[in-house]
Amino acid sequence: MSSRGQAASRKTGKTRKTASVNNFVVKFANVNGSGSASANNLFAKAIFRMGIPVSPHNIFPSNIQGLPTWYEVRVNDKGFLGRREGVDLMVAVNEQTIVRDIESVVPDGFVLYDSSKALRPIRKDVNFLPIPLKDICLREFQHPGQRQLFQNIVYVGALAAFLDIDFEILTGMISEQFRGKEKLILPNVHALELGYHYARDHFDCPLPIRLRPSRKARGKILMDGNTAIGLGCVYGGATVASWYPLTPSTSVVEAYGKYCKRLRIDPGTGKRKFAIVQAEDELAAIGIAIGAGWNGARAFTASSGPGVSLMQEFLGLAYFAEVPVVLFNIQRVGPSTGMPTRTQQGDLLSCAFASHGDTRQVLLFPSTPKECFEFAAAAFDIADRLQTPVIVMSDLELGMNEHVCDPLEWDDAGGYDRGKVLGGEQLEQMEKYGRYLDVDGDGIPWRTLPGAHPERGSYFTRGSSHDAMAAYTEDGDVYAEVMDRLARKFAGAGKVLPEPEIQADGASRGMIYFGTTAGAIPEAQHKFAKRGVRLDTLRIRSYPFHDAVSRFIGEHETVYVIEQNRDAQLKSLLKIDCGANDEKMRSVLSYNGVVISADQIQAAILADLPEAPEQEQASA
Amino acid sequence: MSYIVKPQFHHPQLRKNDLGYTRRDYEGTLTTLCGGCGHDSISAAIIHAVHEMSLAPHQLAKVSGIGCSSKIPSYFLERSHGFNSVHGRMPSIATGANLANRELYYLGISGDGDTASIGLGQFCHIVRRRINMLYIVANNGTYGLTKGQLSATADLGSKTKSGEESQYDNIDLVSLAIDLGASFVARSFSGDKEQLVPLIQAGLSHRGFALIDVISPCVTFNNTPLSAHGYKNTWENNVVLSEIDFVPMRREITARYSAGKDKEITLHDGSVIHLHKTGTGYDPGNRENALLHVNEYKKQGKIATGLLYINQDQSDFHELADTVNKPFNRLNEHDLCPGGEVLADINETFM
């Protein structure tokens, strides 16, 4: 069809009947590398600045330029910001995918497209919003780059009219973005206005799906998890970052570097209180962090599945030789290269047991950017206290997408816990020092740093079997003693690890979840409540598991473990460590590369319930 | 593992250095290597060198990889912290340790398998990163602990005890290091302590990355007349390109050192390297010349030894990274944490 004259929501035409305020999904279908990312981000952030809860998601290819990329923005005034199926408004500006993109729109939904080129009719049950983006930009702008880039800004301007975005917020953001490059402000604002006026002149604005300023997101921040981790490393006192670039972990070290350049410059000398090494590979990246940790600096590396696989041997060394180190695993879809730009919680088992032999690693599971910040900083205390690697298990969903959360907080009275480190003076007072002597009975020995004392406290760190005095040994009983002490240390780790978050109200069924499945839980609970299904919940925040996890499993007849991998890895770990019997443990799994939705959780659990659940009451 | 406890007895009049320590204070546990192993001579040379320099043992940290070579840090400098890490990955441990505390001396010990095969990548990159350390390769052309396989430094045509002949060209660590920008590159022979001791001292004092490739025969698996890395071949084909004496900083220059000297090189810390007249007229200050000589002698089946290349003015990692002088491991929360008020401002930028 010709786009002309067929648009259902033209001023003369009919409009969608059901209005929806602050509750819809807008999806942008773009071509990677076309400059759409900053325009789409402008759109999402403007909604956030209107005080409305919003959750933007990048669904991007492993590609620099040319392949399809999507940006999905859910707006929900109740604060349900997990993924929701269905698209209410599609900005379909990628010809490669436009047919499928239009098919994914809900009936009676909207499609904004570039009408500079005719569109073949494919659906009658959606409303088309044709805007000649290319023609407008060819007419209005001279520079070839601007003619391309500003098509994105024009559609954001049009969306402002369609959805009732506060136009002043948009222009204010443009001014902020180009502070120092003032020449760019005017053409950007012009592009916004072109779209805005075109929409107002040709369609009934706003649409039935629209925004209204809210207070729900006031006082919150919109931040991605990797930025929060980078900042947490600055606050946690990390001075050494070693890494190898790998999506989706790259922005962790980039954020760390960005904040260090602002916050870690010695005022007297202008010199840096940090060092970043882009290593030759992930083996070197973790090795450098371990070398620095051994020598008393707080050090970290950030990676994802393929890189973490390469680090396995070193993780075993750090576990056995008891060297503090922090690793951020921003998980992506494996195995192998898998889907490198999609999300998964697939490294749980490989990280819990990382390396050969009997190893157990401490894991932290943040769910929000705020927790990314807090856990990143805390990871250095935990690693120092326990003298062992700490792996912070984030994922692409949390790391690379922006999330609405409470502002970050820091307690200035807190202070770092550097763990059990003996200085020169303490060594001077001691009669006998043994690196691996369990003098306090908690399985955690005292360490010394190179250079501490001219004659005392030196020892030889090694991955080969050693006795309490750090001497090499092939005595099997001595080896077993060391392994038993390491197990005691691990078992007692809970004292310094984040506790699970429990919401229990005596229900017979429970849900255990962690990390980014958390986004869908409040909405799932809302849906269950409407059907009269009651479920207690427990969110795991660390491994080894606290005792409360075993208790929770024990107190419920059925426990649903919600996770984003094929093999029910958390469930396996719970069975191994909490003695949970197979019968009561059920899995709700999602592993298609996108974050789990409330509908998926609801469908899986309702299907498993023995009795037919009550019919859904009238929707709110 | 040593079942024999090392005797504590020593001569009452052992010479003390400026710190009041005897050589005993720089020793380690008893060696567990084969009798006659070149690596034990390297340990002895290190003890000799560090004692003579009056370096406080706790001011040095030892790092190593895996293999016969990497065991030897147990056998010297017991009062220094040591880290016997993972096969081929000592350079990364050394890098991290050096970043954490720039004030210590770092002595890396590796072997030819550890450096030229499994760890070749890490070796190349630590050279590029200019980490301030002395990296010694105890190079015997064979894998001893796994019983005598050829290594990547075994020369073409070299034969091990089992008769296995090297069919491939070898990796020459000295040429590689010079090519990659190492600022101090030497080759020596475990059997030539006179040459090795001053090279160790100079390498430790040098600011930046220093490599000494030490031919260190494996008496058990690779010391036949047909082994390029055996004693016989090394003695017969060793060509000393440059001979040095080393004068630690703040030490008076004695007549013994100045006799026959050709050139002085003052290191960053004030120590001095004296180059002897060897008749070769070799200038270790020229990188291209160094590569030319090493390769020329190699073609003739000869082994060029001595200080092969030095650039005493190259910046090290910390200078390039512009880090503070105070070691990172002594920075505390006050130095490192921006605090709650700054965080409130950061929050604003995400609203």
Image: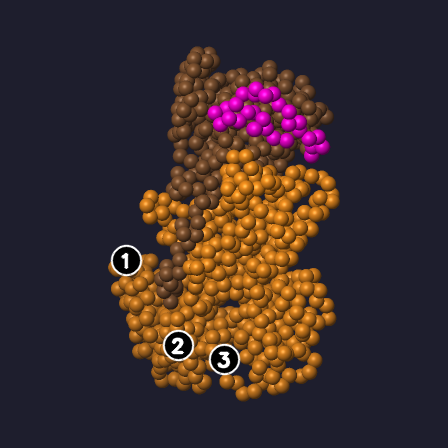
Chain colours: A orange, B brown
Q: Provide the residue designation for mark 1.
A: A181
Mark 3 in CB contact with mark 1 (< 8 angstroms): no
**Residue kind at label 2, given as amino acid type:** Arg
Q: Which of the two discs, 3 and 2, labels the residue nearer the N terminus?
A: 3
What SS does tag 2 mark?
Answer: loop
> Could you tell me residue A501's position as x and y percent?
56, 69
**Residue A70 in sight:** no
Q: Give the Cα distance between marks 3 and 2.
A: 30 Å
Q: Which of the two discs, 3 and 1, labels the residue nearer the N terminus?
A: 3
Q: Residue at x 57, y 82 (%)?
A: A529
Q: Is residue A171 above or below residue A451?
A: below
Mark 1 in CB contact with mark 2 (< 8 angstroms): no
Q: Residue at x 73, y 41 (%)?
A: A475
**Would you identify the image quadrant in which residue B214 lies?**
top right
**Residue B70 in sight:** yes
**Would you identify the image quadrant in which residue A351 lies?**
bottom right
Magenta residues (range): B1-29
Front position in the image: A127 or A243? A243
Is disc 1 on the same chain as disc 3?
yes
Q: Provide the residue designation for mark 2.
A: A215
Q: Is residue A388 left or right of residue A411?
A: right
